[in-house]
Amino acid sequence: MNTEFELAESYARKLDLENSLAKFRERFYVPDQTMYMDGNSLGLMCKESRSSVLRVLDEWATLGIRGWLEAKPPWFYFAEQLGSMCASLVGAAADEVMVTGTTTVNIHQLVNTFYRPIGERRKILADELDFPSDIYALKSILKLRGANPDIDLILAPSKDGRILDERELVELMDDNVSLVFLPSVLYRSGQLLDMQYLTEEAHRRDIVIGFDCCHSVGSVPHHFDTWGVDFATWCSYKYLNAGPGSTAFLYLDKKHFSREPALAGWFGYVKERQFDMSLEFEPSRNAGGWQISSPSILSSAPLEASLKVTLEAGIEAIRKESLRMTAYLMYLIDHSLSQSPYNFSIGTPREDQRRGGHVAIEHEEGLRIGEALRSRGVIPDFRPPNILRIAPIPLYNTYHEIWQVTQHLKDIIDKGEYERYSKQRRAVS
Ligand SMILES: Cc1ncc(COP(=O)(O)O)c(C=O)c1O
């Protein structure tokens, strides 16, 4: 059990004074009277995003179609520019990262590109704790390719419904496996998988491996090139704060640039010749080749600003502070709320190298406690069956807020306040 912190409110204030990223909070719109702990579902809006969206709207109003080349930066190269800005966050070269599509569409694009069943080697390995959309995508890909998901999709089991054992994952990488697709951070427990180890072991067995990094990019440093990861995709609306439904990213190791993108579209065409309008597809020989359609300029605009803020803060500094914040939250739960009558427990791994940016707080009344938190101005999210996810974000949350969240949890139990709420889940929780 972690003992490096203290329980007193004054200690939270002291941690805030030591927080080297505290100055970034004023760069964000923090909703009034709110402790926003939901950055792992939808990050807050940074103030500069408003100006970048307004700039694009003005460009559209004044330039019309000329904006594709005359806007600053030109819309035609905007996705490439944002991709290269993000490359340092994931340890990639500028042309290995592209802003395009959405996470699930990118999974279809990348897995279809890399899934090459040959002879007995025709299975895809994923896991039973995966985000559902990933599994829907993998199953539909297998069906479209004439395979049987009941046989050809292996879902690595978890012993406790929270955590995956990397060694057991590797044991499942046998001669029948063609491709492995896993999350970097599990969306419920917050476990961070050892991507380097898994990649090395997959490659030792000639298996291609990719990752869904929605819950890690912007929170955890990645070293895709060094680790040798084949491909990855991630969204921009969680830790990258680019807004609801904003454009996603994809990464391809440059050794794969000569492959044929599975889902071809005109924005994947070699840029200099795209407007030749040839009917023969000639993909860009970089991650841009995996674009399909026109980039969504309006949804990329907020990302431009929020990426700049993340880069300015520095991913190593963000990770350091995030680990301290989540460790502090776990300490407070362990030391003040784990015993009866509170009975909160932590479902997230304790080791720094094994957790991402959120903490899974488990309680049998998690759903109703979450509702009580909301009415007190604390925004968590809830994932069935009993998990309150709390994501303290170093760019805009404070240690004092974390301390207050635990006081609210205590008070809600002391007063039986959760009993007032329905056991019915909202449409978005
Ligand atoms: C881990 C993970 N993968 C995939 C998705 C789906 O993303 P999208 O709606 O961009 O396809 C989400 C959405 O929250 C997610 O958390």
Image (cartoon, grey):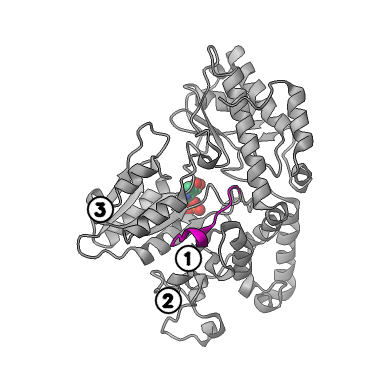
Label 3 crowd bin: few (<14), some (14–19), many (20+), radius 10 Å: many
Q: Which mark is residue 314?
A: none
| Residue 87 in the image, given as x and y percentages of width and height | 59, 63
Residue denoted by label 1: 252
Q: Which mark is residue 152?
A: 3
Residue denoted by label 2: 258
Q: Name the N-terminal-most of marks 1 and 2.
A: 1
| Residue 411 in the image, given as x and y percentages of width and height | 64, 17
What secondary structure is marked by label 1? strand
* Alpha carbon distance from label 3 to label 2: 27 Å
What secondary structure is marked by label 2? loop
Locate the N terminus and report the quarter of the image it occupies: top right
Q: With 33 as the anchor, is 135 left or right in this view?
A: left
| Residue 131 in the image, given as x and y percentages of width and height | 43, 45
| Kind of residue at disc 3 | Asp
Q: Quadrant of residue 6?
A: top right
Ligand 1 near label 2 (Cβ, under 8 Å)?
A: no
Q: Name the N-terminal-most of marks 3 and 1.
A: 3
| Kind of residue at disc 1 | Leu
Q: Please state the extent of the stretch shown in magenta in the rendering.
A: 219-230
181 vs 413: above or below: below
| Residue 321 in the image, given as x and y percentages of width and height | 67, 41
Q: With 41 as the anchor, is 315 left or right in this view?
A: right
300 vs 2: above or below: below
| Kind of residue at disc 2 | Ser
